[in-house]
Image (cartoon, grey):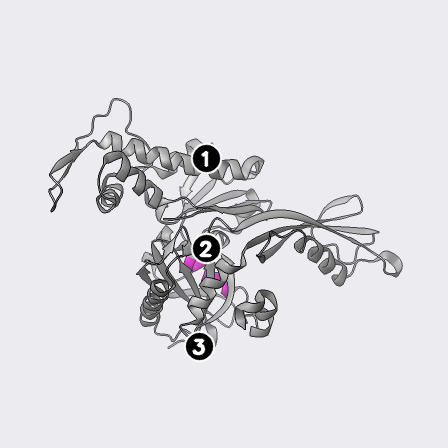
Amino acid sequence: MADPGSIVVGLEVGTSKVCAAVGEVSPAGVFSLLGLGQSKSRGVRKGEITDAQKAIEDVRNAIAEAEQMADVEIRSAYLGVTGAHVRGETRQGLHPIVSEGREITAEDVQDAVENARARDLPHEHVVIHTIRQDFSVDDHDGVANPEGMVGSQLLAHVHVVHGQRNRIDTGVRAVQSLQLEVDNVVFNGLASALAVLTTQQKEMGVLVVDLGAGVTEYAVYGDALLRGCGAFAVGGDHVTNDLAIGLKIPLGRAEQLKVSHGAAEPVARGEDPEPVALPADPGLPERTINLAQLRLIQSARVEETLELVARAVGPSLDLCRAGVVLCGGGARMVGIEAAAQRVFKLPATVGRVQGVSGPVDLLGHPEFAAAIGLARFGAMRRPPPSRGGLRRLLGPWFR
């Protein structure tokens, strides 16, 4: 059994599944994946908990499976958060340098960052991440670390990720009800990027798109800096719903057809695929489904979803010389790389977990990227934050 002090756990409470990834941090700081547990998610819609009791039961089942596979006792986890309420925006914070000699200190840097962080949060929102980009000292732009420089004013450029307090609180309380500590909350979109990107890709510029069942998340990097991130409450479940309506079939059958015969691209011109036979079910007659119509419906929704991301990223797409990396369950769709390449006009690939050792079959599944990234986030911040420090950040969540 692994040393309990070396264990980190990432917990993703998603729309289609709850996933717990267990990792271990070596004395040298190397992270490896020990195991993973999952459970079908029944109490979450569009990335947000709608039935707390069902969600708690599903988390319990995923944790139990992860404990058995990794042969550990799980006491705490880094909890992923997502949903349309999560937003990322770049802000600026100005701080005058008043010390003798105008030399910039670490305290000046922190004050500039805090000035950017604290500005104009939407009502009932709380900061999840404050990620430094770069600084300006007087008229000198693009400064990576201004400490020790001389100037009259310091301008910090930071990317602030924030979300609605009560919605995040619901997830935190659900986990705590199982006698588990929440080490910290992390935006799933950044966790996915942490799992599937290399340092070189971030330096070149890259867009990560996580295609989930209820939420699509994105994060864009340029020159090794986070340039933007966000989430849309649209995903694979919307494809299923479109198919159910367009083909006049139950949701269950629509989901089966999406997985077995669907694709992110329409049928090629001149191709005439065989219709798909649906056997009779109680109350439902036997019928056939036009495969070209199925793929036309599915590809239209996929294109619309990717276009939402493209519009949100905007000019930052020009920074993405390393192209687009796709993950999440939607990355398993046939033709998804071609669809993404067409929409973004960039090379697109399906991502796999980078720089982590562990069971190969788990590392190659794009739907596990967020959970593994959450654990890796924790590994990079060992030892985990003290409960007191987290109380100061999240306030009443720990009262």
Instruction: Between residue 6 and residue 307, name the one nearer to us.
Output: 307
Tell me which amino acid carries mark 1. Answer: Glu
In the rendered image, residue 5, in percent from the top left (x then y), is placed at 48, 76
Q: Quick one: quadrant of the N terminus?
A: bottom left
Relative to 1, say whether 283 is above or below.
Answer: above
Disc 3 target residue: 4
Mark positioned earlier in the residue sequence (1 or 3): 3
Mark positioned earlier in the residue sequence (2 or 1): 2
In the rendered image, residue 30, in percent from the top left (x then y), is placed at 49, 66
Disc 1 target residue: 307
SS at mark 2 in the image: helix
**Res 347 visible:** no
Side of 275 relative to 63 (left or right)? left
Task: Evaluate if marks 1 and 3 touch, with contact meaning CB atoms under 8 Å apart.
Answer: no
In the rendered image, residue 279, in percent from the top left (x then y), is placed at 11, 41
Disc 2 target residue: 195
Magenta highlight range: 371-378
Tell me which amino acid carries mark 2. Answer: Ala
SS at mark 3 in the image: helix
Q: Quick one: quadrant of the C terminus?
A: bottom right
Instruction: Between residue 257 and residue 326, name the one nearer to us.
Output: 257
